[in-house]
Image: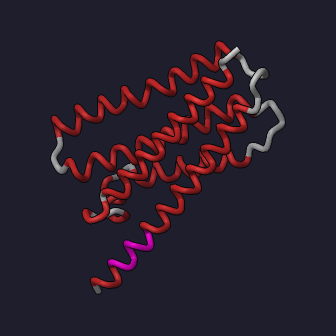
Amino acid sequence: MIFVYYRLGSDFLFIAIILAVILSFLSILNANKLIGLKGYLSVKSLTIQTSTLMVTPIVALIVLSIVIFNFHSLYQERIPHALLVLSMWMLVTNSMFIYRNIKDKNLNLITTIVLGFMSFLAAIYLTPLDRYDKLFNSHYYVIPLAISLVFITITYINLIRIRKICLSI
């Protein structure tokens, strides 16, 4: 019975890691689509949007840190959970931002829609702590922490690349 539970948990982890790789690839691909439109985008609008997308997660992280450290226990469980859900919402907003800016340019929007939809479903599914615990039990908290840090890093790298390339005149 323990072996079946362990095997089931490792299968979910494998699926989560594969999903993370796919989402990371789609995120980079979508940022490249937007970067390819340099010169066709409104610089002022892009500046405001990228600034908002870069500042909002930092504010959310500060609020989450205060809430977790002051009102909760089980830090080793709640911090990776909060970061994973935050990173999923970052991917959703990043894909919405890219969709908003490329929808009128006759580009293939399927990767942007797929990224947004998959990230949205993952964020909704993983938000309740009990579902998160079913997928990542206490032995595997380093995996969601690593996945979330990779997502956050990729999102910020994409936004910095967009700002650097599209906003340079």
Q: Single out the residue that lies furthest toward the bottom.
A: 1
Q: Single out the residue that lies furthest toward the right.
A: 106
For image coordinates 71% across by 14% down, the residue present is 169
Q: How is the image coloured?
A: secondary structure
Instruction: Look at the picture and state if 12 lies above or below 22.
Output: below
For image coordinates 68% across by 35% down, the residue present is 99
Q: How many marks?
A: 0
Percent across and percent down for residue 15 are 49, 66
Percent across and percent down for residue 23 are 57, 51
Viewer-proximal residue among 18 and 8: 18
Q: Magenta segment, which residues?
A: 6-12
Percent across and percent down for residue 136 are 34, 62
- Which quadrant would residue 12 be assigned to in this image? bottom left
**Dominant secondary structure (helix, strand or loop) of the stretch shown in magenta:** helix
Q: Quadrant of the N terminus?
A: bottom left
Q: Is residue 9 magenta?
A: yes
Instruction: Look at the picture and state if 167 lies above or below 82.
Output: above
Q: Is residue 19 left or right of residue 40?
A: left
Q: Is residue 2 left or right of residue 117?
A: left
For image coordinates 39% across by 52% down, the residue present is 146
Percent across and percent down for residue 83 are 36, 44
Instruction: Look at the picture and state if 59 lies above or below 47.
Output: below
Viewer-proximal residue among 26 and 66: 26
For image coordinates 57% across by 17% down, the residue present is 48
Q: Is residue 91 magenta?
A: no
